[in-house]
Image (cartoon, grey):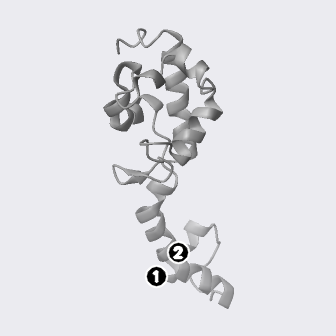
Amino acid sequence: MGYLSAPLLGLRMQADDTPSSSRRAMLKAVPSILAASVLFGKDAHAEARSGAELFYRRCIECHGGGMNSIDPDKSLMKDALKKYNRDSKEAIVKIATTGEGQMPKFLGMVVDGRPYTTEELENVADFILQNAESDWKKFGLR
């Protein structure tokens, strides 16, 4: 294995070179590093899913068309968001992160084999605020 991995690490070696112990240790680590990147790299560095995608996956069950099937007064319409001080990205992310009432916390919830991230909850908040501006008509959800 030794000399085949050297180019991957940018090491220059001649056929008759004997790698030092530190180089040897680096070379031995290459298969493990490559295996880890194949097994875990996609999830660790996967692109954040869009707010629309995640909204349609989980939120639409209770908030289809910007409504609220549990508490109709607390819809995702612009006026209701303002009335309950939920008309900012930060406020929506906080509720999605910690949960409230019957709404579960979404941070870390696994969907399609991947947990929700803060960035993804921010994407959902952006999606909600964009739709609230048009009372959910812009995207044909009402």
- The amino acid marked with disc number 1 is Met
Name the one closer to the observer, 106 or 43.
106
Instruction: Tell me: residue 141, above or below residue 39.
Output: above
Residue at 50 percent across and 25 percent down: it is 127
How many residues crowd around disc 2 within 10 Å: few (fewer than 14), some, or many (20 or more)?
A: some
Q: Is residue 55 left or right of residue 120?
A: left
Instruction: Tell me: residue 129, above or below residue 16.
Output: above
Q: Position of residue 48 (x, y in %)?
A: 50, 41
Name the one closer to the observer, 35 or 58.
58
Residue at 52 percent across and 71 percent down: it is 33
Quarter of the image that includes the C terminus: top left
Instruction: Tell me: residue 28, above or below residue 142.
Output: below
Instruction: Tell me: residue 104, above or below residue 24.
Output: above
CB under 8 Å between discs 1 and 2: yes
Q: Which secondary structure lies at badge 2?
A: helix
Give the residue pinned by disc 1.
1
Give the residue pinned by disc 2.
30
